[in-house]
Image (cartoon, rainbow, N blue to C red):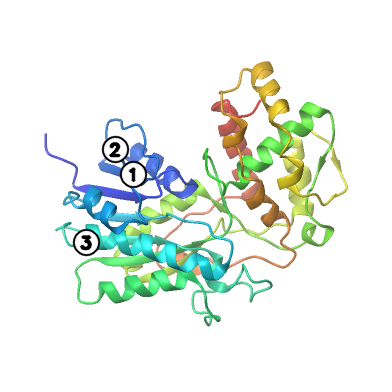
Amino acid sequence: MSSPKNVALVVGAHGIAGLNLIEHLEALGGWEVIGLSRRGGESRQGVSFISVDLLDAADSREKLSGLTHVTHVFYAAYQDRPTLAELVAPNVAMLVNVVNAVEPVARNLQHINLMQGYKVYGAQLGPFKTPARETDAPHMPPAFNVDQQAFLEQRQQGKAWTWSALRPSVVVGYAMGTPMNAALAIAVYASMSKELGIPLRFPGPPSAYDILMDITDARLLAHAMLWAATSPKAANQAFNINNGDQFRWSELWPKIARMFDLEVAPPLPISLVETMADKAPLWDAMVAKHGLAPNPYKDINPWRHAQGMFSINFDFLADPSKARRHGFPGHIETETMFREVFADYRRRKVIP
């Protein structure tokens, strides 16, 4: 049998963006998928995994130099560090190591898609211009996302392949074992609230309860990644990707509570990192009582990311219209997204 024409190299295969992209490509068919991560993965028909240390240039060359048939690279890897300055070196190095290993040998390389975010606009620094647009002026570095894009722009000069960069908001969807997972944090927090017989309280400060915000469905992002990688209109450009609507937690939070048959009470700012640290016994009891999948509580650690999201006390949104003008039609109502994502976690027996 001949191999599929399209071969996707998904860098950061177990993160929320990479995992949902792999599932989307599997459902679509016609793609061979190769996932990269430190921990590798269990291969199945059409999907294989490579365990590689992308911070190690030699290991990257050794593990990736045989990927001569890759046609599309989807880069969604991320290494966390304590400061903005410390983020630059490892995150730029990983991208450089992937490109240095794959681009010279992948004779039919067509596209490299880069995952960014609102950090490009300075969202990590505080209140930024909203709605953010792709044409907004840059801010004072350090900014590893900007350096990554600059590397791709320079590397692409005179080459047949193209690049694109996607800038999602907070990404919501199914994933396990990743610390950047707001949906899992809400699902577990709400499920534990129900188990304890207490109302669902917004855990951020009152100033965060009424800000205007948008969010990005991981499934929608997967569609956008594929669109950007295969549409000539998207070549060598950056695009904001979000659900297409905005919300305030003060309006959405009671609706989320009803999805778990919970009442709401006034917001009460707590440190999710500290408050959820002692919940392993409760989690183990819930797993046994409700027949849940045996996910160890130590692997459910999205609290720092969620605490950051719930602490945003300034408008947090970007204009997604450029992508639509260039042909990407995707959108979803945020309330519907949460309802479907929580249903997916229940179907997979992650929560009751």
Quadrant where the N terminus lies?
top left
Disc 3 crowd rating (10 Å Cα; few below 14, some 14-19, many 20+) is many
Label 3 sits on a secondary structure element that is loop
Label 1 sits on a secondary structure element that is strand
Please state which amino acid type lies under the numbered disc 2: Ser
Which residue lies at the image location 29% right of the left edge and 37% below the top edge?
Answer: 48
Q: Position of residue 69 (x, y in %)?
A: 17, 50
User: Cβ–Cβ below 8 Å for labels 1 and 2?
Assistant: yes
Q: Earlier in the sequence, mark 3 or mark 2?
A: 2
Q: Which residue matches tag 1?
A: 35
Residue closest to the eye, 163 or 270: 270
Is residue 260 visible in the rendered image? The answer is no
Residue closest to the eye, 343 or 205: 205
Which residue lies at the image location 41% right of the left edge and 49% below the top edge?
Answer: 12
**Residue 103 marker:** 3
In the rendered image, which quarter is residue 162 located in?
bottom left
**Horizontal placement of 282 versus 197: left or right?**
left
In the rendered image, which quarter is residue 114 located in?
bottom left
Q: CA distance from mark 1 to mark 3?
A: 16 Å
